[in-house]
Amino acid sequence: MSMRGPALLVLLLTISGGALAADPSSPNAVERGEYLFNAAGCLGCHTDEKGGGKPLAGGRPLATPFGTFYPPNITPDPDHGIGRWSDADFIRALREGKGREGEPLYPAFPYTSYTRMTDRDLSDLKAYLFTREAVPTPNRPHELSPPFSWRFTLAGWQWLYLTEVGPRPDDPSKPPDWNRGRYLVEAVAHCGECHTPRTTLGGLDRDRYLAGNPKGPDGDKVPNITPHPKVGIGSWSPGDIALLLEIGLLPDGDVAGGAMAEVVRNSTSKLTAEDRAAIVAYLKSIPPLE
Amino acid sequence: MDPRVINALAAASVAGVLFLGFGGVVGTAIGADPVALVKQREQTMKTMGGGLGAVAKFVKGEGATVADVRSAAAAITEMVAKDPHTVFPQGTAIGVSDSEAKPELWQNWPKAVEYWNGLKPAAARLTEAANGGDRTQIAQAMQVMSKACSNCHEDFRQKKP
């Protein structure tokens, strides 16, 4: 990295230093949980912002090739939200894709990524969610056509696609920022859920990890973010990637739109500059794919 | 970046602006050819993007100068002064040429106008920061400008498959 790197980091801290809401190194579970809540982008899918819904009360339509999903209410409301969920229930949902009654959950909820979050991060996330306002909004059923509407098929889906359960140990041969970056990209920020193409059954095509998805959420084309020099982001400098994550600006001066604009607004702009740099370090290291 | 490259880029953006001005006149003269109107909008967007890209190069220390930031701010200011009706005329949604504008933009026209008008104070702030020449101020103004662009891109733009 040239001399620019450190200068840029300092600068990026200057741009957003005041806006940082939560602290990932806080000893307080709720504060750590708030940081993870932002990094995991829970707000976007679980809030029907355009329909005037209250935060986290669910209902934002999520159009996919399999039908329309309506993410549920995850406020602490005891009847319509997750107010009666124990820590174990919560961890099981995010790690194994199972509801409170043990029923398999639709993978529109990205548990194939969240499964890699640590116990501590998951329970801190829950601690933060439980400080939010309880909203008694009932859940809206998904609108899916068969066979996707048959929930029993999900067990088979999970057998096929939820093949690695639980957090991965750090790779000791790699520096800490790379390991942190991998954790953020793979687990918490679940980048692969949109940037990796899916099979006809809706599983992530892991051979094409982060190589872009022509049929992303809401019909958007989602770009290749592997370091391929032509079709990926191989020609981007580390500062280019960090700036995209912080303010949504692409190297050519375009500004990210669609779902990524929301991700930047709710999530990556609220990370620390160190975490954005860790994401950059990891993305620069993965195999370039066409 | 090599100063000659910067100069060439600056010349290209000026040429782009001149071409756009000319194209604008022609576009009006030949009436409402939707394909031409979409191309014209693309040029408007490219001019704004080119400007913001130059600002980012300065902020990232990648060669652009304060003078480049000033010309970028001037180009962006000229674009955002346009009437949104001329930038987003009816009948130029996705499906026309390579338009990326969702039909929702016209269905929520007051919102679209609000977003467009939000570009103006952002451009003014960028101009002020460019005149001051302070890198941090310029970086913050760039962030505000980027946010103003993303409002509309988030709601009303769809990347073509």
Image (spheres, coloured by chain):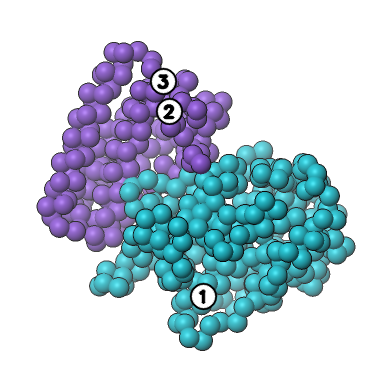
As measured in the structure, the alpha-carbon distance from the residue carrying label 3 to the one carrying label 1 is: 49 Å
Residue B20 place in picture, x, y as percent: 25, 28
- Residue occupying the point 56% across, 64% down: A207
Residue on which disc 2 sits: B97
Camera-nearest label, 1 or 2:
2
Figure quadrant of the N terminus of chain A: bottom left
Quadrant hosting residue A15: bottom left
Q: Is residue A282 left or right of residue A139?
A: left
Quadrant hosting residue B18: top left
Q: What letter labels the chain drawn in cyan?
A: A
The label number, if any, that marks residue B34 in the structure image: 3
Q: Chain of mark 2?
A: B
Residue B39 place in picture, x, y as percent: 35, 28
- Residue occupying the point 23% across, 26% down: B21
- For badge 3, the amino acid type reads Pro
- Residue occupying the point 64% across, 72% down: A117
The label number, if any, that marks residue A180 in the structure image: 1
As measured in the structure, the alpha-carbon distance from the residue carrying label 1 to the one carrying label 2 is: 43 Å
